[in-house]
Image: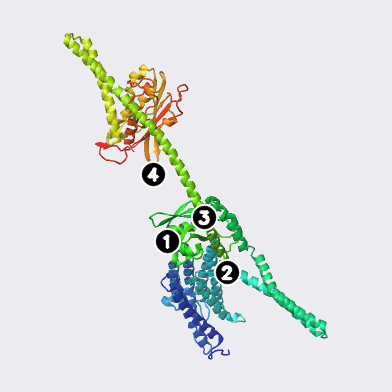
Amino acid sequence: MTPILFGLQAPVVVSLGTALGYFILIMLVIQRRGWSEWPLRTMILYLALSVLLSVGLSLTLWLGLRSDVPQIGERLAADLLTASAPLVVALTLMFVSRPGAKWVALVGLFWLGFVIAVDFNLFGLQQAILGTLPAAATDPMKPLRAAGWAGFSAGTLMLILVDFLQTRRPLHRNRILFWLLGLLFLLLGELLMWLDKAAFMVDVNQIGVVLRFSGAVILTIAMISYHLPVLRTVTRQLLSGTLTTLFIGGLIFLGIMTVLTVAQQEVTLGALVAAVTTAIVLGAVIHPLRLLIARLIERVVYSGRYNPARALRDYGDAINNIVDLNTLSTVAVGIIAEALDVRRGSLMLINQRESQPVIDVVIMEGMGALTLQVAEFSQTSPIVHYLTEGAKPLTQYEIDILPEYRPAPIPERYWLHSLEMEVYVPIRDKENLVGIFAFGRKESGEPYSTQDLDVLMTVANQTTVVLQNARLVSDLRTANTSITQLNAELTESNRRLEKLDKAKTDFIEIASHELRTPLTQVRGYSDILADMVQQGGFVAAHMNQISQGITRASVRLEQIISAMLDVSRIDAQALDIRTAAISVAAAVKMAVDNYKEAIRDRKMNVQVVDLDGLPPVQGDLQRLCQAFGNLMGNAIKFTPDGGNIIVSGRTLEDSSNGRSQRFVEVMFADMGIGIDAADQKLIFEKFYRVGTVELHSTGTTKFKGAGPGLGLPIAKGVIQAHGGKIWVESAGHDETRLPGSTFHIVLPVAMPPASGSTGPLRGKVS
């Protein structure tokens, strides 16, 4: 073999050249990215093994060409080739951010140790294994090494192919495709290095060395570079350039052939004019023709082109007079999506929080199955910083890959990734971020080109003023709505205050009457007693009647004063609740029994059903009897004579707060005159009474004989002090149809955790 450089043959020069190339790649990795990260360290280790492999091959070839040397160099080179296979798997796992790289490296290290041990007959392994393997004259372990290499290589290809098929984002797919291209070169080269060159007419081993180095170059570029060439674009440009060159070359060839044909004839003035004319025509049309052909081929190969100037003009005309945010989002996203062939997009609004380093990102209506939601971003986030300061749109690829975005909070990155968007275009007002355009991947699968990103930035700049105007209009509408709502609430509050003020006035009149009536009775009976003392005529029957009258008047007076005191305690949240396990059925029975005489006199039918099976509740028996009694008295008052009243109950379950909780519901349903919807909340306010003051009655059970307006407020206070709720349902007030009313009381089986003692418990009334 003839020496070609410094007396070295071509195979030796090729191996030494690749060794130098691998060393340069190591320096490039260290210079560009350092070695602080595990993927970079693994890549440097792989390239270092490749340096040793190439140096070993060159030494083996150099010695083998000069003397009959043993094949130990080839065996060591094969071992290094075997060791590099699991490293490629580990690099691929780290490249696609999948776990398991360290385990693969450990398995590869174990495999390499096993192969070396068998190769050098450590522990007598060679004799034990060679019996099952065909032994070759020079390297009996070659089949075992090749099998291990094939297994690791097949696993690498399957891994990267699966990840490629699962990825839908164009730039992510391009990155994986770039790695796959490098793997194909590298593994094809290693396959040729395993083959026996004697079986081929050319030195396939040296071709394999070159291909392997080419693959390593591609893998190194993919590892240390974030912005890789878009292979689809490069392929399309190469195809377009090749077809254009062939077409133009064909025209030039025809022109030359025409000139040669003319030159073979007699040179006449006509022939000379024809040649000059042909040259002038070719010179004039070749450049515009080349551009036209390139454009036609580009349109045929890739039909997703658009006219940027026309797109920007149409966009400006469409959004110019829009003042509604939802309309702006829909129209703007729709026009851009149509131009770029996108099926997913949205306008996001940025809301700055006062005195907080946080912004809210609000998704508006757009294209695609988007959930309208709000996300919280830190103002110190690198993502927010770039969108505020950066000169170009931000891609999801950059957020996922570039190291400067790794410090961004994980919830922010996860939320953006879940949107399935490809590019985020900031809409800025001077130095403030006011909105973001977000668009998904193109239907063609092409990534966004530089022209696309420039158009999007121009569109965002055009949108700034329109967006500000739309937000101002939206704020004005919101303010008007709020003012209208506040006016309505103020009107309702004034109406309610008027009712309550009238109720207080009525209460003073009613309370005066309520207090004066028993006091008058007491005074009257006292005067009678005084007369009897003066006259000395004490009759037992008269004395008994007088004492009963004084007692009734005193009891009524005590009831009124106790009710007033209870209302004041409820207002002060100082109602004493002494808890114990009580039966709801027993409490209701005690309350109903207090009205037996009134029920009999009014000829009413009272049914108590479905209470015996209710679980006991923690509460104050006296207070619950008081609340139930007030509801019973209310039902009797507003139900005509002979009417029906039903008291029922049931058990409820609630798991909405994450833990199961049991409640007891008691319902007092009457067939009375009902309650207007406007009064159904007011009746629980103290002093409020339905009807006119003329219907006042000092009795407690007279039909429509309203009292001082304290019974239902006391019932509400007692129920709320037990952690329960009370409300009324009624179809309205009608003294003819008698729609009736149903009062609902819901009590927790266990008291709220305010105190663990069984002593006095301060009720909290909300």
Q: Is residue 586 found left or right of 181 in the rendered image?
A: left
Type of the residue with mark 1: Ser
Reading the image, the residue beneath label 4 is 657
**Tag 1 residue:** 381
Helix or strand or loop: what does disc 1 sit on?
A: loop
Cα separation, mark 4 vs mark 3, equals 41 Å
Question: What's the distance in space between the residues labelled 3 and 2, CA to CA?
Answer: 37 Å
- Three-letter amino acid code at the position of disc 2: Leu
Q: Mark 2 — residue?
A: 231
Task: Describe residue 194's horizontal placement relative to residue 389 as left or right.
Answer: right
Which label sits in the foreground, 3 or 1? 3
Question: What's the CA distance linking mark 2 and mark 4?
Answer: 54 Å
Q: Quadrant of residue 278?
A: bottom right
For marks 1 and 2, give the one nearer the viewer.
Answer: 1
Q: Amino acid at mark 4?
A: Asn
Q: Front-most of 724 and 81?
A: 724
Q: CA distance from mark 1 to mark 2?
A: 32 Å
**Mark 2–mark 4 CB contact (< 8 Å):** no
Above or below for 50 versus 492? below
Residue 476 percent coordinates (x, y): 48, 48
Q: Which residue is mark 3?
A: 467
Q: Is residue 127 visible?
A: no
Which numbered disc flags the more N-terminal residue, 3 or 2?
A: 2
Q: Which SS class for mark 3?
A: helix
